[in-house]
Image (tube, rainbow, N blue to C red):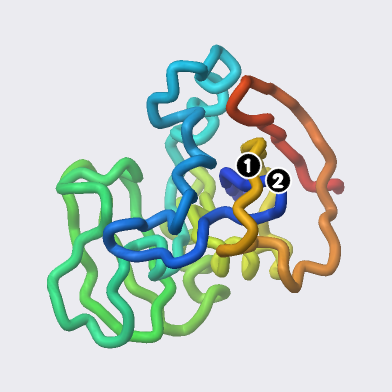
Amino acid sequence: MPDTTCHMSISLDGFVAGPDQSRADPLGKRGQELHGWHIGDPRANDADKVANEWLMRPRGAYVMGRNMFGPIRGDWDEEWTGWWGPEPPYHAPVFVLTHHGHDPIEMDGGTTFHFVTEGFDAAYSAACQAAGDNGVDIAGGASTVRQALIAGVIDELTLDIAPVLLGSGERIFDGVESFGFEPAEVLHSPLTTHIRYRRVS
């Protein structure tokens, strides 16, 4: 079976988003500080460029949580097609975990958002089937990555560890009882340390 990957930026104290996420502040308060390495900070270097290539490599399908897809909670009472504009960066099927059903949303560039109400296992199974030989990526947010770690489906986990303390927000390791990965590659810049982990076989 092709690899399942996950790539997340994280603070030194374990948060992948700051507190009080909202439409105006989708990464939460100070959450953007985790992402300077790939969103235009002039201190970014060649290591950050390589890690960005890891992040953006094409995958056959993606799984994400509704919180990653957008800020709307409860019933779908307004039109929303994601944070990314008319052509999201995925260019593949994206399976969105939600408690509220929604018809698929087809976007430019080959991305279609499918909404799965039966839980993580159902979304992951659908993504594997859709991906074929091209692999699946667990795109976030924190709750979805936690579920994937607990289910043991991630083969390669990349963490971009920013020298930032957020103090509160969204964690990915709460409730994860074992890690099961070893470092395969480490790159660093003034903005972050990129660690690419592989599952221990």
Amino acid at pointer 2: Leu
User: Circle 1 — which element?
Assistant: loop
Q: Position of residue 150 (x, y in %)?
A: 72, 69
- Tag 2 and tag 1, C-beta contact below 8 Å: yes
Q: Would you say residue 48 is visible in this rendering?
A: yes
Query: Where is residue 158 drawn, in percent x and y?
Result: 65, 40
Q: CA distance from mark 2 to mark 1?
A: 6 Å
- How many residues crowd around disc 2 within 10 Å: few (fewer than 14), some, or many (20 or more)? some
Amino acid marked by disc 1: Val
Q: Does residue 148 appear left or right of residue 31 in this picture?
A: right
- Considering every residue shown, the one lying at the far top of the view is 46
Residue 160 x %, y %: 62, 37
Helix, strand or loop for disc 2? loop
Question: Vertically, is 8 above or below 191?
Answer: below
Taking the spot 65% from the left edge, 61% from the top edge, the residue there is 172
* 162 relative position to 186: left or right: left
**Residue at horizontal 69%, vertical 22%?**
187
Instruction: Check the image and report above or below for 188 versus 160.
Output: above
Residue situated in front as seen by the camera: 47 or 33: 33
Determine the residue positioned at 66% across, 36% down: 163
Q: Which residue is mark 2?
A: 12
Q: How many marks?
A: 2
Q: Is residue 1 visible?
A: no
Q: Which residue occupies the foreground of this view, 172 or 56?
A: 172
Residue matched to label 1:
164
